[in-house]
Image (tube, helix red, strand yellow):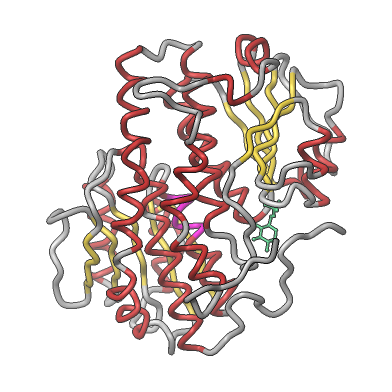
Amino acid sequence: STVDKGEFRHFMMKEIYEQPEVVKATLQGRISEKHLLEQAFGSDATAAFDQADHVQIIACGTSFHAGLVAKYWLEDMAGIPCAIEVASEYRYRKHVIPAKTLFVTISQSGETADTLAALRAVKGKVLASLAICNVPGSSLVRESDLCLMTNAGPEIGVASTKAFTTQLVALLMLSIALARRHGLTEAKEAELVQALHQLPVLLLAAVKLNKDIEVLSQDFAEKNHALFLGRGPLYPIAMEGALKLKEISYIHAEAYPAGELKHGPLALVDKEMPVIAVAPNNALLDKLKANLQEVKARGGELFVFAGADHIQPEEGLKVEQMPDVPEILEPIVYTIPLQLLSYHVAVLKGTDVDQPRNLAKSVTVE
Ligand code: G6P
């Protein structure tokens, strides 16, 4: 069936707005009121999950950023080691694969050449392979032992949006499945699952910041550089925000874990380089605030996405207030304003939002 833009000017915006709904589809039939329904991973998954004591994640691009978040979740919740690497590196080196490795690939298309090659390189050397993928019947799904479909529906915009947030949901479900075997209590599982039930509504609240963020985007259209900061699982979200801005607005952007500022990027801070921080109200907020002060003290212009009333706006510091969200959902919900920001900056710059120059939706050749 053909997909059209409906009332939207670009597929990217349509896909951003679809996120509350497609996340619901990703969760559909996979959680009960308080439990993960593990059958979602297929009947062969049980044995693999029982035995796995190491996870290796492989992906490219935006999918790689989803995997980076999963490393925080898996090591925190399941307490099992998780390694993650981009496919183009992994496929061309010798690796040490610990016994009982669950090999997880993440891909929107299921056709990314490097990701497929990495999977083929470990055939017979891993406990099981699991594909987290958005395209049923794709090569990656066919060649993996297990799969969990993300159910985001066709994604047309080259810059990935709804595929990313649904990958995060899938990875959160995987983390719960593995954590169950490593001391996750029923009460904790219920808390995580109840948080997941709230996710569509929270995503809707985040999408509603669209108009505010459109206004904010005016401060970026004339800039040539931007720096994104985050800590913990919000660091990969900062990376994803930087990637989105690069891809569609052609503004050079990079992301740093906020604690690394003083080891280099502070030297770049001035009025010409806006600094964007994702700053939910979690245990790392005070640390992050100290990092923001370091930026302020050097005359940097700050744009902070923060929970209610935790950071006050001041001269040189704009705050966009986010809905309060359960900590486990922060990476997913805080992705939305960064998608919206890159979109509006790109529109102001007049770029081809859905088909940015030099990029392809699916990289099926090396
Ligand atoms: C291309 C796309 C990105 C995507 C990456 C990985 O670079 O432009 O949006 O994240 O490939 O694609 P995959 O289909 O494997 O997730």
* In-front residue for pair 318/200: 200
- Tell me where residue 313 appears, x and y as whole percent: 15, 69
- Tell me where residue 38 appears, x and y as whole percent: 54, 20
- The quarter in which the C terminus is drawn is bottom right
Quarter of the displayed picture in which ligand 1 can be seen: bottom right
- The quarter in which the N terminus is drawn is bottom right
Q: Is residue 238 magenta?
A: yes
Question: In the picture provided, is 136 more to the left or to the right than 301?
Answer: right
* In-front residue for pair 40/347: 40
* In-front residue for pair 320/145: 145
In the image, is residue 4 above or below residue 365? below
Which residue lies at the image location 57% right of the left edge and 75% below the top edge?
248
- Tell me where residue 231 appears, x and y as whole percent: 38, 48
- Tell me where residue 228 appears, x and y as whole percent: 42, 63
Which residue lies at the image location 64% right of the left edge and 10% below the top edge?
51
Bounds of the magenta span? Answer: 235-240
Which residue lies at the image location 36% right of the left edge and 66% below the top edge?
276
The image quadrant of residue 198 is: top left
In the image, is residue 77 above or below residue 156? above
What count of labels does the image hold?
Answer: 0
The image quadrant of residue 341 is: bottom left
Which residue lies at the image location 31% right of the left edge and 49% below the top edge?
202
Question: In the picture provided, is 230 more to the left or to the right than 351?
Answer: left
Q: Is residue 258 magenta?
A: no
Question: In the picture provided, is 204 more to the left or to the right than 53?
Answer: left
The image quadrant of residue 188 is: top left
Q: Main secondary structure of the magenta part?
A: helix
Question: In the picture provided, is 281 more to the left or to the right than 26?
Answer: left
